[in-house]
Amino acid sequence: MVKLIQKEYSQFEETLYIAKLSSGLQLILLPKKGFRETVAMMSVGFGAMDTDFSYKGKLYHYPSGIAHFLEHKLFEAAQGEDVALQFSQLGADSNAYTSFDRTSYFFSTTGHVEKSLQLLQSFIVERHFTEQSIEREKGIIEQEIAMYQDDADDRLYQLLLAQLFPATPMAQDIAGSSDSIAAISYKDLQKNHDLFYTADNRKLVVVGDFSPKDLAKVIDDTEEMLTIPSTKKIEKIPIAYNPVIAKATVYQDIVSPKVAVGYRGLPLGENQDPLRTKLVLQLLLDMLLGWTSQSYQGFYGTGLIDDRFDIEVECYGNFLFVVITADTYEPIALATKLQQSINQIKDLPDVTEEHFQQVVYECYGAFLSEMDSPYDMAMQLTRFSHYLQIPDMLKNISLEDVLREGLSFFETADRAEIVMLPK
């Protein structure tokens, strides 16, 4: 019998159920009474940055893009059948994605939840790919990489990361490069599958209308029937903090110039919560440069930016960065003005208690919108098991906290910028 731990969130009438199964799998269930759609997401702690690690005293290095390559090949079922087709036959839509630190497989369905879950649990631990199918897949992934390179926004973002984290896995596209993909072998994929796709390195999140007790039993029974790679003690090599590449200019087939400015923070300490840190920085940047700020309205009103202006905060245990991107006909001027806003945080008219409360309410509203999306909640809970604590965090974060921690981040952060111009 699965022991489910209940966590009540009375302010929005939700109950989260958490369990650690005997196999080692971490299980998170969020029942949503009355919802027709159910989303399940299986997340594996193996991502694009995990190309260098130590196992049994031996150092391993694999080509960039191997996690993404393995994601592709696990959808190959016996006799070359497509796992996505098997999900479709159950009435479920399936997909997967690879990020910096994890690979996530998911499905969405309005029926056959248990059978779809059994398929999700089984196909990621069973491998049916062959040396021949791997060689065929290389051409497909090369086309995918070329597509990303043709997308100006994707290329701009990746090039900025390469400036912030030079000579590290973060400097490479998640899908890898033509050269790195060509170097990946059957044995490479097999070894990484054995090492990383263990039960204790996986998290399963299910969001929808179901009985937590009954569903947990189905999931546990399926785990017991599977042959899962045994637990491995792997030591991941931390990302190197090499000197950033401060400035760059590139050319692309675009109409409007683009600019991206990035800030690389220090790794978080053991007692720092990545989710809270992300919230603090997001609140500060919303005050300084969000759509309600005088800076944003001034930039927008004078045509310096358009509605594609974007701010992203990425916070993990071993790396933290902020990226600001914009389409603008004055990329250098905009980059300068953005830095001026950062330098004058305390003196800006937008930094008031009233404006702070406004961006807090906006953040809370965005959280409530996510609560209505099974996919959004599944995705967030795979990253942050305590994601439902955001309302309490927002209550306990003060303007003083945001200014103190935000100033500390920007004072110690390394900065890089890249301008993309039309050819």
Image: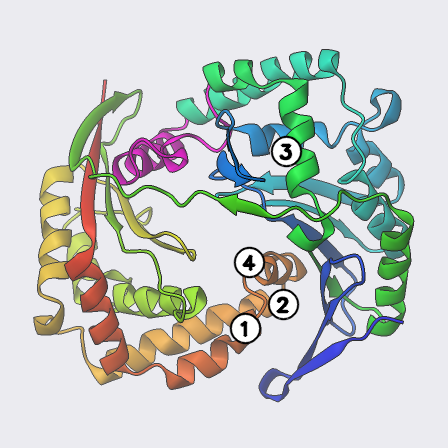
Q: Quadrant of the N terminus?
A: bottom right
Query: Between disc 4 and disc 2, whose residue precedes?
Result: 2
Marks 2/1 in contact by CB < 8 Å: the verdict is yes
Q: Residue at 48%, 26% (x, y): give it.
A: 176
Q: Residue at 30%, 83% (x, y): give it.
A: 398
Of the pair 192 and 171, the residue shown nearer to us = 192
Query: Between disc 1 and disc 3, whose residue precedes?
Result: 3
Let me know if residue 330 appears in the view: no
Q: Mark 4 points at which residue?
A: 383
Q: Residue at 39%, 85% (x, y): give it.
A: 396
Q: Position of residue 322 (x, y in %)?
A: 30, 52
Few, some or many C-alpha atoms within 10 Å of disc 1 (few <14, some 14-19, many ≥20)? Answer: few
Q: Position of residue 297 (x, y in %)?
A: 20, 60
Q: Name the residue under label 2.
A: 372
Q: Mark 3 points at which residue?
A: 192
- In this rendering, the label closer to the viewer, 4 or 2: 4
The correct choice, above or below, for 213 with respect to 186 in the image is: below
Report whether 283 appears left or right of 371: left
Report whether 255 appears left or right of 128: left
Question: Which amino acid type is marked by label 1?
Answer: Leu
The residue segment tinted magenta is 151-177
Per the image, label 4 sits on a secondary structure element best described as: helix
Query: Between disc 3 and disc 2, whose residue precedes?
Result: 3
Question: Which amino acid type is marked by label 3?
Answer: Asn
Instruction: Name the disc covering residue 368, or none.
Output: 1
Question: Which amino acid type is marked by label 2?
Answer: Asp
Marks 3/2 in contact by CB < 8 Å: the verdict is no
Marks 4/3 in contact by CB < 8 Å: the verdict is no
